[in-house]
Amino acid sequence: MKKNRLTIMILLAMLLGGIVGYIVNVSASPEFITGFSDKIKLLGTIFIRLVKMIIAPLVFSTLVVGIAKMGDLKAVGRVGGKAMLWFVSASLVSLLLGLVLVNIFKPGASIDLSYAQGSSIDDLVKNSQEGFTLKKFIEHIVPQSIVEAMSHNEILQIVVFSIFFGVAMTALGDYTKPILKALDVLAHITLKMVNYVMNFAPLGVFGALAAVIAINGLGIFKFYLVYFLYFLIGIFVLWLLLIGVGYMILGKRVFDLLKRLGNPLLIAFSTTSSEAVFPKLTEELQKFGCKKSIVSFILPLGYSFNLDGSMMYMTFASMAIAQAYGIQLDLATQLTMLLVLMITSKGIAGVPRASLVIVLATCAMFNIPPEGVALILPIDHFCDMFRSATNAVGNGLATSVVSKWEGELGPETEILDTEA
């Protein structure tokens, strides 16, 4: 009910923002419209800053816990290597698919938001066209101080530190269990904060839409329809690719797997949360024939490294926002963005709208106005339903495929194996 209330509030905020913005658009003077837009946008700014507030603890805690739960690195090296082969391949395909489709369909091109930058739009476009140099890219990856990286929300640097930290914890074994427990608690606290922050989403939506429609009129809503339909095409193509590769490895059993995943997919779709489906997904994969030890290792790892639907959405959303602001990114810069997202997406949590945190950070890196994230928020809930279900499919396939590669995929059973 709480999730439904938030969704209803966001939809009402979208409607109210449209009405207020339209009234201002058709009845006020240009000077008033400009002043109104500047002031009402502050609501969106508040929401954006609240989201930025949780970037560092969210990435650090979830990624370290995910790595530390791998266990003995030597014992799981072979299984982990096979899992990472699938994760990296699926990630690249998902990110590249989103990038290709957004360049073909150009869902953000129907909106001209250059007004928001005023006279500074020329400098913004110039900076975006410069792209990343190798020097800048290295500086964005390698931290010189984790405190500095966190204070400036340098997400790539936080990821690098988290990887070293997680590997070191794993190497030390049981000695680090108190720290692992503490970081697990921190991760849950941060995820709870995400829910609190999302309560401010209706205000951000209202402010962003009222400001945009006051300038552009109701034509702004054309964007949401185009954006959502093109996103669904992307999800459909991604499902075809995942199931196709699964069929090549699992054969006809891939369809039995999809039947097993039916219930978990419904939970993920209705709650817009990949995490909500974790217990049921674990149970169904074991019933499908996957060995418990492999499920307990691969599945938690997949929730940090293998959220295919979310990753496809990241390139799609980031580029759509750039298109909405009239920013042209050359191919080299787009590929750099893909590589950046390939790294930054590895700390994302499977909770509602968590991918927006990564999209926002990426937009800031590439001089794309982060305020654009608030513009896609009204439709994001519906996008999140489909990408959460896709995340569940991707992790179910990954676990089953690795089990098959290990020769540990047994027959289906309705009785869970209690052995490790």
Image (tube, rainbow, N blue to C red):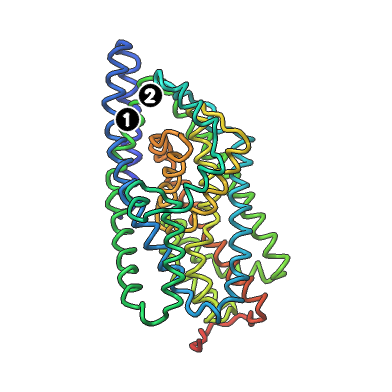
Q: Are marks 2 and 1 in contact (CB under 8 Å)?
A: yes
Disc 2 marks which amino acid? Ile
Helix or strand or loop: what does disc 1 sit on? helix
Residue under label 2, please give it.
213
- Say which quarter of the image contains residue 251: bottom right
Disc 1 marks which amino acid? Gly
Q: Residue at x 47, y 28 (%)?
A: 325
Along the line of sight, the residue nearer the viewer: 290 or 306:
306
Counting residues from the N terminus, which is met first, the one under dot 2 or under dot 1? 1
Q: Residue at x 67, y 71 (%)?
A: 253
Q: Position of residue 15 (x, y in %)?
A: 34, 32
Assign the N terminus to one quadrant of the image.
Answer: bottom left
Q: Position of residue 126 (x, y in %)?
A: 51, 26
Instruction: Report whether residue 165 is seen.
Output: yes
- In the picture, measured across the screen, residue 121 lies left or right of residue 38, that is right
Instruction: Report whether residue 6 is seen.
Output: no
Residue 17 marker: 1
